[in-house]
Structures are given as structure tokens and as C-alpha cells.
Image: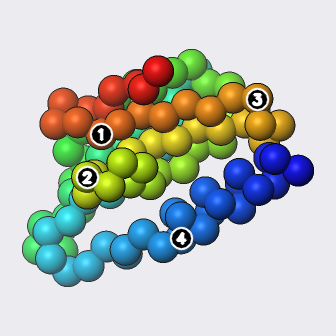
Amino acid sequence: MLSFILSAMIQLISSSAAAPAHYPAHFVRTEVAHGSVWADVWETHAGQLSMRATTRLRAADPRLRFVTVDVDGDGRTDVVAYALDGRELQVWRATDDGFTALQ
């Protein structure tokens, strides 16, 4: 039950994030490659999309789901990883140099 509530809450928060517009913006996308989970920061300028940075978050784990959301309200997109069984939760805070794992 806890996993259902956690999943629903994170989906609700992430669905309320603003969609990219025609003005300069950035967004974060996570992907699995070479056995690791990576966070890619993308930017748009004048309708052109380009990758700004990429950061390795951790080794891939099929139990975890990754959601990008502004956790701390600083206007930057952070990354949250959670297990559906409710036994694991990790947060990476966005910084100027990439992402920092919170303990």
C-alpha cells in the first residue's frame, strides 16, 4: 500500500511540472546505459535542443523507478529514485556541476 501511495504522489508531482516552451529552458531525462543510470540535462534555445551535461547517478537496478521533479523548490529539476516495494528511496539534488546524492 505504501508503494502505491508513494508512486501516485510522485506521478502527481511530476505531472504538474511545466512543459518546455519556446523560450530558453532545460529539462532532465534519465536513461540506462552500460549498466548505469545517467541523468542527462537538456537545453532548448531558439527551438534547438542540445545536451548540456550528463551525470552517472548509480548502477542500474531493475527494482528502482526514476522521476525528475524539483524536490527542494530551488527551481532546478532533481532526480528521485524509489522502489515499488517502499524499501528504497534516493534523491539527487541538482547543482551547477551536475547532481549530488542526498544522504
Q: Do the CB atoms of the residues marked 2 and 1 lie less than 8 Å apart?
A: yes
The amino acid pointed to by label 4 is: Ser
Residue under label 2, please give it.
74
Number of marks: 4
Say what secondary structure mark 3 lies in: loop
Q: Quadrant of residue 26?
A: bottom left
The residue at the point 42 percent across, 26 percent down is 102
Q: Which numbered circle lies on residue 15?
A: 4
Specify which label sits upstream in the sequence, 4 or 3.
Answer: 4
Left or right side of 45 for 101: right
Give the CA separation, mark 3 to mark 1: 24 Å
| Up/down of 46 relative to 65, above or below | below
- Tag 3: residue type? Arg
Residue labelled with disc 3: 87
Q: Who's the residue at 20% across and 80% down the image?
A: 22
* Mark 1 nearby-residue class (10 Å; few <14, some 14–19, many ≥20): many
